[in-house]
Amino acid sequence: MSSAGPQGLQAVPRELQDREAWLDPFDWYERMREAAPVRYDPERRTWDVFRYEDVKRVLNDDELFSADPQKADDFVEPEAPGEGLILDTMLFEDPPRHGELRGVVDEWFQPRTLADREPHFRELAGELLDDAVGPHGQMDVVADLAYPFPVTVIAELLGIPPSDRDRFKTWSNTIVEAASDEENADAFAERQQQTQMEMAQYFLEMIEDRREDPQDDLLSVIVTAESDAGGRLSREEALGMCILLLVAGNITTTNLIANAVRCFAEADGDLFDELRGDDRALTSAIEEVLRYRSPVQAMGRVATEDVTMRGETIEAGDRVIVWLGSANRDERQFEAADTFRPNRSPTQHLGFGHGTHYCLGAPLARLEAKVGLSALLDRIEHVRLTEAPLQPTRSSFIYGVESLPIRYDERR
Ligand code: HEM
């Protein structure tokens, strides 16, 4: 079995290790919701929670279920400098420190702040599609839009050169990657460590640069918080924040956009036609993609006290994985949960998590998906998936495909 890694999320359950299984984990989730809704997996030394109600309960209770992997009994202190930076971020902090860290940047992710940037986001998506769409009638949704668009947006918000985006892709992929059977655990851990150190070095230089010459960007906000009189952020926290924002705002949204195109192309009738020019319908369809093919399938917590769920006793210090992707398909919560219904009335899906750690970037992700997809709808019609077999992302918690080739007719 693979190393647990700092987030404790890299360990994939045996049942999902096969790539085919990760492309379609939903039947397995259903069986688990029925037969073992809260189960201990001795191989990963982890509890898995599958039902909507239970997942929500865990995410609602910061005191009983900590987001800090360092509280796990089997937590191993990172050895190399730079490797643990991601642990110093809001994602893995509990209140009250969590709120202090989130407060440094949350203004930037409010819908009203982002609204000012929407016209510019439209331009960016338009430029990418002007290059990709043509009379040849084919494109790869991931390579041509779903990857470059969000990474360019987050690079611009942070204030780092979008031209470095190939590097960001390699880094982000490595950070969310699962260990594979072909690579031994030590080599995998070494690659993870190397990546975090490279990212730290990169951002260290950027931070120094902004200290000299502040700009209107997130990097400058972070630098200011680090150099505040009270020192709101330590150097490690500032670096961790940069890494978190780059990684969290990147692969997740890529998969939302690509999963959306996949859902739309597989839907009955011509959904592309129905959604074109109708922002409300598109917005609701995007919410359904977040439920039906959730880009983030799982999150980790650590029990801080002994707690009983569904008759099982989770002990203090045990790791717990909540399966958002399973909760979002729970028939107890959603009617016809296994059906993609683009006009489903608002649901409380858990695609962005729930509670204290509810996704900071949700308004940005929603806006990017709406802008990116409507730019695509404007340019193409009669969209078909190709016969090429889909390859799932190589991650234990991110759900999507490595590439999504489509054929289409160009709209004129
Ligand atoms: C947290 C999903 C896009 C930044 C989360 C969590 C989920 C999630 C499930 C909760 C983690 C937990 O409970 O432990 C997604 C999905 C996205 C997306 C599905 C795209 C479709 C973004 C974007 C950003 C972002 C664009 C911005 C840069 C964050 C941050 C957190 C977070 C900083 C930690 C929040 C906290 O701990 O308070 N995200 N995310 N995410 N997300 Fe996103």
Image (cartoon, rainbow, N blue to C red):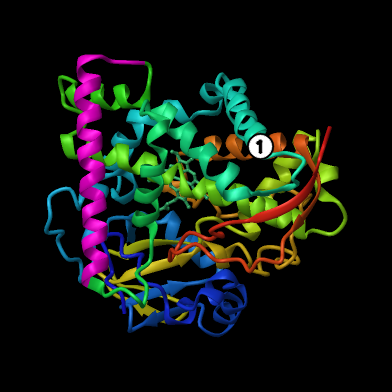
Residue at 20% x, 66% y is: 75
Residue at 41% x, 32% y is: 163
Can residue 106 be seen here? The reply is no
Decide: is 60 above or below 155.
below
Residue placed most toward the observer, 145 or 363 = 145
Question: Residue 210 colored magenta?
Answer: yes
Q: Which residues are magenta?
A: 186-215
Check disc 1 and give the amino acid type. Answer: Lys
Residue placed most toward the observer, 338 or 3 = 3
Is residue 123 rendered to the left or right of residue 180? right
Residue 116: x and y in percent read 56, 18
Residue placed most toward the observer, 206 or 89 = 206
Mark 1 lies on residue: 370
Confirm if mark 1 falls within 8 A of ligand 1: no
Residue at 75% x, 46% y is: 137
Decide: is 23 above or below 262.
below
Majority secondary structure of magenta residues: helix
Question: Residue 305 colored magenta?
Answer: no
Give the quadrant of residue 6.
Answer: bottom left
Residue 410: x and y in percent read 80, 40
Q: Secondary structure at mark 1?
A: helix
Give the quadrant of residue 317.
Answer: bottom left
Q: Quadrant of the C terminus?
A: top right
Residue placed most toward the observer, 80 or 52 = 80
Is residue 55 rendered to the left or right of residue 343? left
